[in-house]
Image (spheres, rainbow, N blue to C red):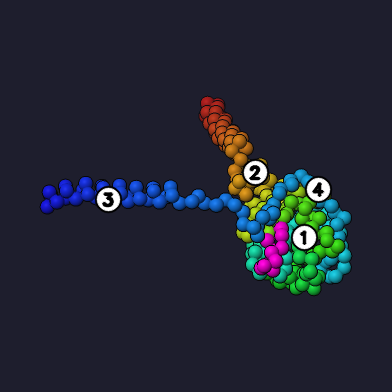
């Protein structure tokens, strides 16, 4: 039995080596993964234009059927969440709006009080009646009054102008009868300056809170939000807010100093009490 094991060991090694050689040969012969963008997605994406200001005089049709300029939703001392979707989208837009609604439910602030939300259709054929229906659906999902969440449709081709200003590039796929676009929401200041892009169909509550706090210059948000904004910064690669090492070290240093100061203060008070007791005993 021992001899058979000794003979089988080299055989096993040779088999493994042969398999590895075959795998390497197949891998080297395989064509490299294509990095070419599919034709249907060419020209689709986001060109971030942080710090750029949108035209607040662009007009759209509100869910009540009347034209309204973007200026109606800005200049109120509140940041604005902007998302470009279309209401008859079979999948992605619904996922974006569902994810946004879920996140907004977790935020204690209310659209219309601490911030505004402006949702605009990129499909020029969609009507304000459809926008009104979508608004009813998502406000029902939000679960509480949200007077500051507005659903608009295009007017005189202004949605293309707005999309260009925020760097939101989309295209219509004739074969599928759908719009190709990126899953993203944008956060703007009260003056219409682009402050942050948040990507995906699920948005972290912390990211949205920090983005709104950042866009408001600290006018909204709790003290803890402002502290988090000091310790976190937006990382474009991570597409979210991540710890800012330098500020964390600074905050940690301040915390250590405060704790040390507190300990020394307690120690000093105890020593004073002990000294007072000794003096009292001596006088007695």
Q: Which residue is mark 3?
A: 15
Mark 1 touching mark 4, by CB under 8 A? no
Question: Looking at this view, is 121 or 124 the one in front?
Answer: 124
Element class at badge 1: strand
The residue nearer to you, when weighing 181 against 95, is 181
Q: Upstream in the sequence, badge 1 or badge 4?
A: 4
Q: Is residue 29 left or right of residue 274?
A: left
Closest to the camera, between mark 2 and mark 1, is 1
The label nearer to you, 1 versus 4, is 4
Asked if residue 189 can be seen in this view, the reply is no
- Quick one: 148 or 194, which is closer to the camera? 194
Q: Position of residue 73 (x, y in %)?
A: 82, 58
Q: Nearer the viewer, mark 1 or mark 3?
A: 3
Q: Quadrant of residue 114?
A: bottom right
Q: Nearer the viewer, mark 3 or mark 4?
A: 3
Residue 135 in the magenta stretch? The answer is no
- 280 relative to 69, above or below: above
Q: Does 151 sit left or right of 5 as displayed?
A: right
Numbered label attached to residue 53: 4
Q: Residues within 10 Å of mark 2 (few under 14, many from 20)?
A: some
- Of callouts 2 and 4, the N-terminal one: 4
List the residue tagged with mark 2. 233
Which image quadrant for residue 89? Answer: bottom right
Which mark is nearer the camera, 2 or 4? 4
How far, Cα to Cα, is label 1 from label 3? 64 Å
Q: Nearer the viewer, mark 3 or mark 2?
A: 3
Q: Earlier in the sequence, mark 3 or mark 4?
A: 3
Residue 110 horizontal/vertical position (percent): 74, 60
The magenta segment is 170-180
**Residue position marked by numbered label 1 in the rendering:** 118
């Amino acid at each position: 039995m021992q001899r058979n094991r000794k003979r089988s060991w080299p055989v096993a090694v040779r088999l493994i080596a042969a398999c590895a050689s075959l795998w390497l040969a197949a891998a080297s012969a395989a064509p490299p993964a294509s990095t070419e963008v599919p034709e249907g997605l060419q020209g689709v994406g986001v060109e971030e234009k942080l710090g750029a200001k949108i035209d607040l005089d662009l007009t759209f049709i509100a869910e009540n059927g009347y034209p309204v300029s973007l200026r109606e939703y800005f200049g109120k001392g509140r940041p604005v969440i902007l998302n470009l979707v279309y209401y008859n989208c079979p999948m992605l837009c619904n996922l974006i709006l569902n994810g946004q609604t879920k996140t907004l439910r977790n935020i204690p602030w209310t659209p219309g009080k601490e911030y505004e939300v402006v949702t605009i259709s990129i499909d020029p054929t969609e009507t304000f009646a459809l926008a009104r229906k979508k608004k009813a659906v998502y406000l029902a999902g939000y679960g509480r009054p949200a007077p500051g969440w507005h659903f608009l449709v295009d007017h005189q081709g202004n949605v293309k102008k707005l999309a260009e200003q925020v760097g939101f590039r989309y295209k219509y796929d004739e074969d599928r009868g759908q719009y190709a676009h990126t899953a993203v929401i944008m956060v703007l200041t009260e003056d219409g300056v682009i402050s942050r892009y948040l990507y995906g169909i699920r948005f972290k509550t912390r990211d949205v809170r920090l983005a709104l706090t950042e866009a408001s210059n600290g006018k909204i948000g709790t003290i803890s939000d402002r502290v988090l904004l000091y310790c976190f910064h937006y990382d474009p690669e991570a597409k979210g807010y991540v710890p800012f090492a330098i500020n964390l070290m600074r905050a940690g240093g301040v915390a250590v100093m405060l704790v040390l100061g507190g300990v020394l203060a307690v120690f000093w008070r105890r020593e004073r009490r002990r000294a007072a007791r000794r003096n009292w005993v001596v006088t007695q």
